[in-house]
Image: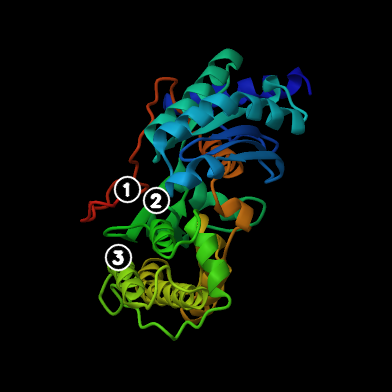
Amino acid sequence: MGDSHGANATLQWSLIAHRRAGRETWQAPPIAVLVLGIETSCDETAAAVVEGSGRVRSNIVLSQLDEHRPYGGVVPEIAARGHVLHLDRLIIRAMAEASLDFADLDGVAATAGPGLIGGLMVGLTTAKAIAAVHELPLIAVNHLEAHALTPRLGQSLAFPYLLLLISGGHCQFLMVEDVGAYRRLGTTLDDALGEAFDKAARMMGLPYPGGPAIEDAARSGDADRFDLPRPMAGRPGCDFSFSGLKTAVRKTITDLPGSPPRARDVADLCASFQAAVADVLEDRLGHAAAAFHGAHGRGGALVVAGGVAANRYLRQRLAASAARFDLGLVAPAPALCTDNAAIVAWAGVERLRHGFTDPLDVAARPRWPLDPEAKPAIGAGVKA
């Protein structure tokens, strides 16, 4: 620790200011850049410090699952209150584990959207205070961009690549062409995939969160027992729909003898549900791969990110189908798929290298599409 690093940071951000003023004296931050990341977009309170080299110096995540489990989902007011109670000490812990003082940092990054507005305001306001007091650049991070850039954390992955973002709030195909440059190919018309997993699990009497519960139960199930629909399969384009699949799960449960359903029935239904999801993803991937190859030529990578990307069955199915479409599968470590602050800090590193910083009056945004040119999708459940 010391002042020399902070002095170097001051020089770098002076040069960034010149670039923003239209001058040509800007230069990229050094690879040793250090960024504090803060994540409060949903029900995880998290803080992390990441180096420009990709080294994660600390990554602290406090889950609120126990607080929300009785309600079968996230309660926004409870989530925001949890962030207020715990964020400060998590930041102190993250800085201590990284063996750093705030003066050693080159920037502070916080998720500014999309997400639950109360939680976003807690994290972003905290980041603003740290940036103001310590005279550090502020980076307001799009949570979707954090997931989009995660596979570049600690490994070499060149732009462009195809991204399948599957989480509790989003289900999209995007072409990732550079930091800040994204083209959406398709999105969900109703539920996000993680939301569909949670709701299907609740119908079967499984605990929250539903994704891991369904994956566990499906391991002993027969995926061929129940004939569930594959919504949107065979149709043109890259959009998704999961409401019909949820309805089919409910009807199947209603038609089963006895209530609640037996453990064998639940295992078979989980396996059938998971197989239907994989079939839909593979079908949509064919269209997305064709669009990606048409824009950028053959080859390239399919990146699968977001909380649902931690599902091992879906990873295996997508790896096989990606190879058929001349794409290599890249999936972050499971711990980096779910919400955490390391991916936010890394997005901050990437944006700082491009000279992208934000003023202290930047606002939190509950909806914030990565591709501002994409037309709004039809459906009440669409979040971005």
Q: CA distance from mark 1 to mark 2?
A: 7 Å
Q: Which residue occupies the foreground of this view, 357 or 147? A: 147
Whole-percent x and y of residue 33?
A: 66, 34
The kind of secondary structure element at disc 2 is: loop
Q: In the image, 349: left or right of 78?
A: right
Rendered position, 148 above or below 292: above
**Residue carrying label 3:** 241
Q: In the image, 343: left or right of 223?
A: right
Residue lying furthest left in this view? Answer: 378
Q: CA distance from mark 3 to mark 2?
A: 13 Å
Q: Callout 3, which amino acid?
A: Ser
Whole-percent x and y of residue 30?
A: 66, 35
Q: Callout 2, which amino acid?
A: Gly
**Residue carrying label 1:** 383
The kind of secondary structure element at disc 1 is: loop
Rendered position, 202 above or below 118: below
Closer to the N terminus: mark 3 or mark 1? 3
Label 1 crowd bin: few (<14), some (14–19), many (20+), radius 10 Å? many
